[in-house]
Image: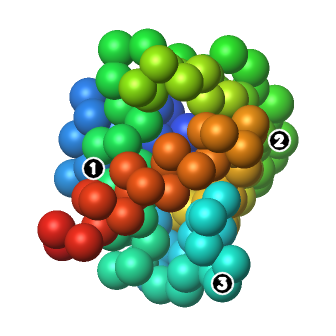
Amino acid sequence: MQKGPLRSWHDIVRTRDAGGLDELLADDVVFYSPVVHTPQVGKVISTMYLSAAVHVFGNESFRYVREIVGESDAVLEFETEIDGILVNGVDLIKWNSDGKITEFKVMVRPLKAINLIHQKMAEVLVKR
């Protein structure tokens, strides 16, 4: 029985272990960052960005506060606090019939949070 992409994603977020991304993401997945203007296409680059996001966003304050789930897509609203700044955003996730994520889009507010996320993500990605 297939666990389902949302449950798998929640496991990754809860454990802060991005190791499950290889199995969860489709080979042709597209990742849309709130701070990079071009889509990131493919499993390798998407895994890199999502792993960094798990590291940057994933602290004790991170929580999903609302979920709107369809047959093959979902909107997950989240909140977290990073360096004293409240970050609010949504993950828009689509998956295929095999349960693999094909699109992952992150939107963040307010502007102060976007600037902070940009800085923190750059620090993590430059190390990879």
User: How far apart are the alpha carbons under marks 1 and 2?
Assistant: 24 Å
Height in image: 99 above or below 27?
A: above
Tag in front: 2 or 3: 3
User: How far apart are the alpha carbons under marks 2 and 3?
Assistant: 26 Å
Task: Kindly identify the amino acid type of the residue bearing the numbered disc 1.
Answer: Ala
Kindly identify the residue that appears in the image at 66 percent across and 84 percent down.
38
Answer left or right for 96 relative to 21.
Answer: right
Q: Which residue is mark 3?
A: 38
Answer left or right for 31 relative to 126.
Answer: right
Q: Residue 18: which disc?
A: 1
Res. 2 visible in picture: no
Comparing 105 with 43, the one in front is 105
* Secondary structure under the numbered disc 1 in the rendered image: helix
- Crowding around mark 2 (Cα neighbors within 10 Å: few <14, some 14 to 19, many 20+) is few
Residue 122 coordinates in the image, percent (x, y)? 37, 64
Task: Kindly identify the amino acid type of the residue bearing the numbered disc 3.
Answer: Thr
Comparing 106 with 67, the one in front is 106
Q: Residue 70: which disc?
A: 2
Residue 56 coordinates in the image, percent (x, y)? 36, 42
Kindly identify the residue that appears in the image at 43 percent across and 55 percent down.
119
